[in-house]
Image (tube, rainbow, N blue to C red):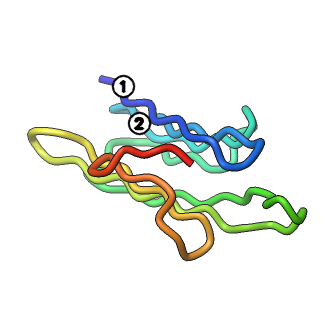
Amino acid sequence: MKDVWKLKYGSHSIQIENRLTGSRLYVDGVLQDELVGIHLSSRMFGKVKNDEGEDEDIKVSIGCNLLKTDCRVFIGERLAYSTDLQWEM
């Protein structure tokens, strides 16, 4: 099983991969965080530059239950993506 979520933030691409063997966070194709092993929930962290060239924190929360896997991405303090809402920036 593999879940992949992709979103755009300005000119940047963010990709989250979740597999049975672990989770990975990529920004512009560069691995920024990785969790190895089986997890029912996980948190990953990274950084991305905004339009002004300042670093902003990325927080990814992944939760698994029997029926589906949910992913939420926060950039700064703002929700940027949620599998419940599925919008693109």
Of 29 and 19, which appears nearest the observer? 29
Name the amino acid, label 1.
Lys
Which is more N-terminal, label 2 or label 1? 1
Contact? badges 1 and 2 (CB < 8 Å): yes
Depth order, front residue of 22/30: 30
Q: Quadrant of the N terminus?
A: top left
Q: Check the image and report above or below for 64 versus 1.
A: below
Q: At 74% from the left edge and 42% from the top edge, which residue is drawn?
A: 12
Q: Is residue 87 above or below residue 72?
A: above
Please, what is the three-letter code of the amino acid marked with disc 2? Asn
Residue 62 as seen in the image, left or right of residue 79: left
Q: Residue 46: image x %, image y %?
A: 66, 58
CA separation, marks 1 and 2?
A: 6 Å
Q: Which residue is mark 2?
A: 18
* Residue 82 x, y percent position in the rendering: 37, 52
* Horizontal side of residue 44 vs 64, given as left or right: right
SS state under label 2: strand
Circle 1: element type: strand
Q: Which mark is residue 2?
A: 1
Q: Residues within 10 Å of mark 1 (few under 14, many from 20)?
A: few
* Residue positioned 53% across, 35% down in the render: 6
Quadrant assignment, res 56: bottom right
